[in-house]
């Protein structure tokens, strides 16, 4: 990979983190209020993200011959396997309990929200456990 790729990743990550911060998704209290149907502000964020993704996924392959850093556009599987569904359920439970998912947890560290380190430790432990389990079942 060349330096332009890493620069694009850095800029993309910074923009994503800034967006999460601006949307207050780095505050677990706000996310938990949304999940309890007490605060609908994040629904605008979620709806906007879905609409932008829909438009980009439909238009970009028609405008560009290939992505900037890949040989071609790939296809995404619509429905996952049993393991994917179980993993999504576990992720959802963790999100509901902590009020944080990985992106906002990392962005929240940038604002000095150090208790999010516990959430990130749990995320890394879960990822390690899943990798260990998958390698064991092969």
Image (cartoon, rainbow, N blue to C red):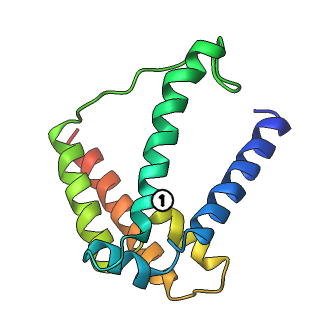
Is 6 left, or right, of 96 in this rendering? right
Is 94 left, or right, of 20 in this rendering? left
Residue linked to disc 1: 45
Residue 55 position, x and y percent, is: 51, 31
Front one among 61 and 105: 61
Quick check: 138 above or below 87?
Answer: above
Q: Residue at x 43, y 44 (%)?
A: 50
Residue lying farthest to the right in this orientation = 3
Quick check: 49 above or below 43?
Answer: above
Quick check: 70 above or below 119?
Answer: above
Determine the secondary structure under disc 1. helix
Q: Quadrant of the C terminus?
A: top left
Give the quarter of the image for residue 76. top left
Residue 123 position, x and y percent, is: 40, 67
Q: Residue at x 36, y 77 (%)?
A: 39
Quick check: 100 above or below 92?
Answer: below
Is 1 left, or right, of 121 in this rendering? right
Q: Residue at x 75, y 33 (%)?
A: 1
**Dot 1: within a 10 Å radius of its alpha carbon, few (fewer than 14), some, or many (20 or more) residues?**
some
Give the quarter of the image for residue 62. top right
Give the quarter of the image for residue 79. top left
Residue 136 position, x and y percent, is: 23, 48
Q: Residue at x 84, y 39 (%)?
A: 3
Is 4 left, or right, of 113 in this rendering? right
Residue 134 position, x and y percent, is: 27, 46
Front one among 19 and 11: 19
């Amino acid at each position: 990979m060349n330096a332009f790729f890493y620069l694009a990743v850095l800029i993309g990550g910074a923009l994503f983190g800034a967006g999460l911060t601006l949307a207050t998704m780095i505050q677990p209290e706000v996310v938990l209020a949304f999940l309890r149907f007490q605060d609908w502000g994040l629904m605008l964020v979620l709806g906007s993200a879905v609409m932008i993704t829909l438009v980009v996924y439909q238009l970009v392959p028609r405008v560009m011959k290939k992505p900037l850093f890949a040989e071609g556009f790939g296809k995404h599987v619509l429905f996952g396997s049993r393991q994917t569904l179980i993993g999504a359920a576990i992720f959802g439970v963790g999100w509901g309990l902590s009020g944080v998912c990985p992106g906002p947890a990392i962005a929240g560290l940038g604002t000095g929200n150090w208790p999010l380190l516990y959430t990130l430790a749990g995320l890394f432990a879960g990822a390690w456990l899943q990798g260990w389990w998958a390698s064991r079942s092969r």
